Image (cartoon, rainbow, N blue to C red):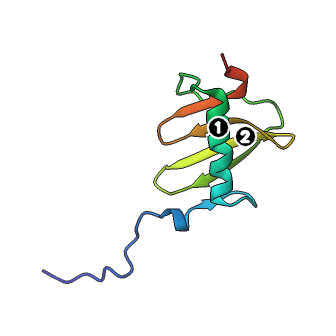
Amino acid sequence: MAQQNVNDATTKPTAASAQTNCDLTVPQVYDLFCFVKAVCGRSTGTSEPPVVPAGAVEVYADFGDFDTIAVWIVNGWPVAASDQMTLTHWSLNFRR
């Protein structure tokens, strides 16, 4: 059996190598995500993405292998969040 060079093998990104699509850091995006979850208290109960107001800006932290959290922001305030790996979503418009 031939030997393989594993030094160049691809590995799943870790929290240290996670990236965002904005100027926020991964911990900042995660804080916003946790804020929306805490305020909502419960998920939307559907696998459909949350309904967000027009003009909402999506920011996300991508951990690789479809492990992404997203937060939608309107006028500087988070209004919805999504754990895209588990298809669980929270929306301030959905609060009961």
For this orientation, the residue located farthest to the left is: 1
Q: Are marks 1 and 2 in contact (CB under 8 Å)?
A: yes
User: In the image, is 40 to the left or to the right of 76?
Assistant: left
Q: Quadrant of residue 58?
A: top right
Q: Quadrant of residue 37?
A: top right
Q: Secondary structure at mark 1?
A: strand
66 relative to 56, above or below: below
How many numbered marks have been drawn onto this rendered protein structure?
A: 2
Closest to the observer: 2 or 74? Answer: 74
- Residue drawn where x is 67% and y is 40% of the image: 35
60 relative to 93, above or below: below
- Residue drawn where x is 36% and y is 82% of the image: 7
Q: CA distance from mark 1 to mark 2?
A: 6 Å
Give the residue type at disc 1.
Answer: Ala
User: Around disc 2, counting alpha carbons within 10 Å, would you say few (fewer than 14), some (14 to 19), or many (20 or more)?
Assistant: many
User: Around disc 1, counting alpha carbons within 10 Å, would you say few (fewer than 14), some (14 to 19), or many (20 or more)?
Assistant: many
Quadrant location, the C terminus: top right
Rendered location of residue 25, percent (x, y): 68, 61
User: In the image, is 49 to the left or to the right of 93?
Assistant: left
For this orientation, the residue located farthest to the top is: 96
Q: Quadrant of residue 62?
A: bottom right
Quadrant location, the N terminus: bottom left
Q: Earlier in the sequence, mark 1 or mark 2?
A: 2
Give the residue type at disc 2.
Answer: Trp
- Residue drawn where x is 71% and y is 27% of the image: 92
- Residue drawn where x is 63% and y is 57% of the image: 27
Q: Which mark is residue 72?
A: 2
Residue matched to label 1: 81
Rendered location of residue 32, percent (x, y): 69, 45
Rendered location of residue 9, percent (x, y): 37, 74
Q: Secondary structure at mark 2?
A: strand
Q: Which mark is residue 10?
A: none
